[in-house]
Image (cartoon, rainbow, N blue to C red):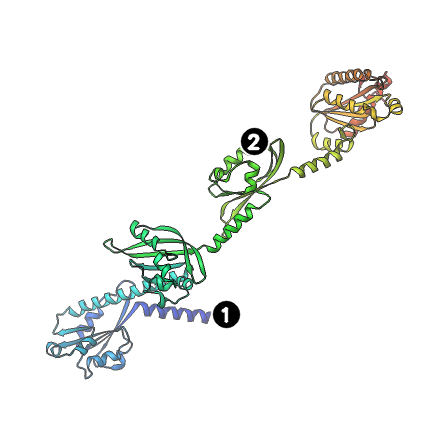
Amino acid sequence: MSSSACASATASRRNVSSRLISLSLSTDIRIFSEDPLLLADVRNIAPLERFEHEVSGYRSFSPEAVRGSDIIVLDLPVAERPEAVRALCKPGAILVFCMEAEAFAVLRTPSLEAADDIWVKPFHRDFGAVRFKKILAGIKHRKDSRLTQTYLDTIIDSIPDLIWFKDVKGSHLKVNNGFCHAVGKKKEDVQGRGHYYIWDLKKEEYEQGEYICLESDEIVLEERRTCLFDEMVKSKQGMRQFKTYKSPLFDDDGTILGTVGIAHDVTDLANMGAELEIFLRNMPFAILISGNDGRIINVNAKFEEYFAAKEKNIVGKPYEEWKHVIQKSLCKTYGEGHFEIRLHGDGEERILEFHEEPIFDVLRNRVGQFCFCRDVTIERTFEHQIWISANTDALTGLYNRRFFYEYMNENRKENQLSLLYVDLDDFKKVNDAHGHHIGALELVARLMREAFPGDFIVRLGGDEFLICLVGERSLAFLEEKANRLLQSLLEAFQVSDYLRVMSASIGIASSADPGTKLDDLVRQSDIAMYAAKQSGKSRCCVYSPGLIKK
C-alpha cells in the first residue's frame, strides 16, 4: 500500500471514529416556534459532561426537518395529528408538543401517547429551560446506560471463559459467547432460561442436581461472598472440569439479586496434569519440583526410593533446607545448579548427579524450579576404572610416568618440588632367577606408601620409582625420610630368601624455583641416585652440580 493510500485509510478511520463519537455523545435539538425567548432559553443551556448538543430553530413546520432529530419541540399550529408527526420521527426521538389548555383538553389517547411530553401554554419564562435540562439528563442517562452495556458486553464476550449472571431462582439473565459455545446455544436461547433447558438435562439429572452446580450457588447465596469451586459440568463437548468463581449480586439495600459466575475450563489441563503425574512417576530419574516460594511441590517414586522419603513428608518443605542436608554428602561440583553427592545405605554406595533448572511461564516469568538427579554410580565406576588403567601401573598400583608429568605440570605451580629417585640394587639378578611372581615390586610399592603417605609416588618403569613431595621441605628432612625408607626396605628384603641380596639407592633433588624444568629435576635426582650406587649402594645422595652421571 502506498503512503498516500495509507494516509487516506487513516483519515477514513478517523472520520468514521468521529462520526461514531458524534452519534453517541451529541444531541440534535430542533425547535419549531415563533417564540424567540424559547429558542434563546434552550440555546443558553450548558452541555452536560461528556455530551454536546446542537439547537436549530424553525419558524414554520417542515416534515423533512423533523426526520433525524433527537429532540423535536413543536410550538406551532400543525395540521397533522400528533401521531402523524410521531411517524416522521426516528426511533427513540423525543417529541414535545406545546399547546393551549383548551387544545390539550380535547386530545384523544392516541395523540397523548404519541407525545413524550406536552407543555401547556402559557408557561413560565424559565419553564422551557428547566424541562430541557431534564430531557437532556434523561438522554444522557440512557446513552450512558447503553454505553455501559456495550462496555460490559464487549468485555465479557472477549473473555474465552464462561461468564453468566443469574437471579436467585437460577435463571440466566446474561451470558457471554464463551458460555454459549460451551452449551451449544445462542444467547437468545439461553438468556432467561434455567439449567434444565440450557444444559439439556434429563429429568432425573436435574432432580438430583448433578452437573448443574446448584449446590455451589446455594453456598454463595448463604455465605454472601465470592467462593471458588471445582465443578464437573455436562457440556456440549461432554463432561468438563471447571475452576469456577461465584459471587453474590447485591441491591442498594443489601438484598441479594442473584449471582455472577466465571468458569475456566481446566479439563485439558487436568488431563495434562494426570499424564504428567504418570510420566513423572515412571521416569528413571529422581525428580523434585519446587514453587517460586521455594517450597517443594512434587516428587516422584524414584526420588522416594533414592532418599527414603515419602512424598507426604517432604512436599511443602523448603527446598533449600532439604538441599543443605543432602549437600553434606557433596562429592563434586560442576557449577551453579550442577553437583554430585555420595549416599551410603544398605551397605551400598550410590553416586547421584543433580541438575537444577528454572521453570518459566509463557511470559518468561520464573514460576519454580525443576530438579532431577540420576544414579551415575556405574558410570563413575567405569570412568574410575578407565582412569586407573590410563594413569597407574597395573602391577604396583602406583601412578605411571605419563600421569606424573601431567599432574605435576598442572599442580606444581609456584611450590617447591622435591624428588626422591629410587632404584633397586641387584633386582635384575633376583628377577632373572625367580621372576616377577615373588612380589618384589609390590612390596617396594607398599613400603613407599607407608613411608610417604599422601605424597605422589610413581613407577617410572622396571625397578625405578619417583617419590614427589610438593611444598617446602628441607634437605635434612628429605635425607632423613630417604634413610628411613632404605632401612625399611632392607629389613623387608632380609626376611625373604629370594630378596635378601637386594637393596635400594635413592637420589634426592629439590628446587624452590618454579622455573626449573621438571625434566631437569628428574635428571638431577637420577644423577644423585647413580652417585649413591657408586658410593656402595643402600644409601641416599643429594644432588649437587659437581655430581656427574657415569
Q: Amino acid at mark 1?
A: Ser
352 with respect to 317 (left or right): right
User: Above or below — where is 87 with respect to 528?
Assistant: below
Q: Position of residue 52 (x, y in %)?
A: 28, 67
Secondary structure under the numbered disc 2 in the rendered image:
helix
What percent of the width, then of the height, locates residue 330?
59, 33
Dot 2 alpha-carbon crowd within 10 angstroms: few under 14, some 14 to 19, many 20 or more: few
Q: Which residue is mark 1?
A: 3
Badge 2 amino acid = Lys
Tell me the element at label 1. Answer: helix
Q: Quadrant of residue 304?
A: top right
Position of residue 549 in the picture relative to residue 187 (left or right): right
Residue occupied by mark 2: 328
- Front-most of residues 376 and 504: 376
| Residue drawn where x is 45% and y is 72% of the image | 8
Residue most extreme to the left: 102
**Quadrant including the C terminus:** top right
* Snapshot quadrant of residue 112: bottom left
Please tell me which of labels 1 and 2 falls first in the chain. Answer: 1
